[in-house]
Amino acid sequence: MQLKLSSTKAVTIELKPYEHDESHAGEGFEFSFDYNCHMLPKGIDEKRFFISFLGEVNSPEEGFCCQVAYMADFSSDEDLPENFITSPFALVNAPAIAYPFFRAFLANLMLNAGYKPTLLPSINFVKLAAEKIRDQVSEQEKISDD
């Protein structure tokens, strides 16, 4: 099976002034991040999947808060199995391939908006994937207990 990154795009961008909050007093640059893998409903296009990123950057020093939803579109030369979104490629490799595009987009966005370029940290997708799987198992156990 041949998989490739077909395109990336920003879906939503929210840039606003940083609201000072006593609970965050003295804190510097903050970055939060999550990602998910999605497939289209069965029968629409079974050769594509998407990685969605949601990142939030808060910079009290620069005076901004920025939230970005970003999408990476991947394609395959074969139909993807239904359980593909739980595969190591979907949870680790694909996000690691697309993350540099998200990272560069956010740095350029902030620079073009008049702020210092925002350099996002590296992400350990192996660790994040393990956490996602553990959370899914925990959620499934809660459902089966009810």
Image (cartoon, rainbow, N blue to C red):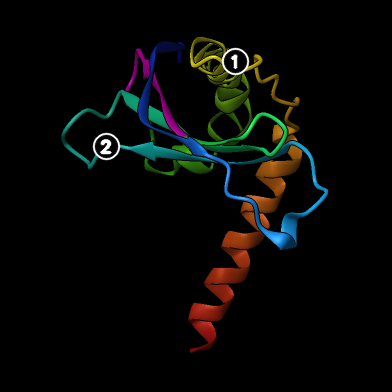
> Who is closer to the viewer here, 112 or 72?
112
Q: Position of residue 12 (x, y in %)?
A: 35, 33
Q: Residue at x 66, y 29 (%)?
A: 62
Other-residue count near label 2 (Cα within 10 Å), few / some / many at <14 / 14–19 / ≥20 = few
Left or right for 32, reference 38: right
User: Judging from the image, what secondary structure is the residue with disc 2 in?
Assistant: loop
Name the residue that disc number 2 marks.
40
Q: For the point 66% across and 20% down, which residue is it?
A: 118
Residue 130 higher or lower than 95, as above or below: below
Magenta segment, principal secondary structure?
strand
Measured from the top left, where is residue 41 in percent x and y? 23, 42
The residue lying toward the viewer, choosing from 61 and 143, is 61
Lower sequence index among marks 1 and 2: 2
Q: Which amino acid type is marked by label 2?
A: Leu
Q: Above or below — where is 7 with respect to 139?
A: above
The quadrant of the image that shows the N terminus is: top left
Locate residue 121: give its quadrant.
top right
Looking at the image, residue 121 sits to the left or right of residue 136; the answer is right
- Report the residue marked by disc 1: 107
Q: Which mark is residue 137?
A: none
* Residue at the image position 61 percent from the left and 15 percent from the top: 100
Mark 1 Cα within 10 Å, few/some/many (few <14, many 20+)? some
Q: Amino acid at mark 1?
A: Ala
Q: Which residues are magenta?
A: 68-79
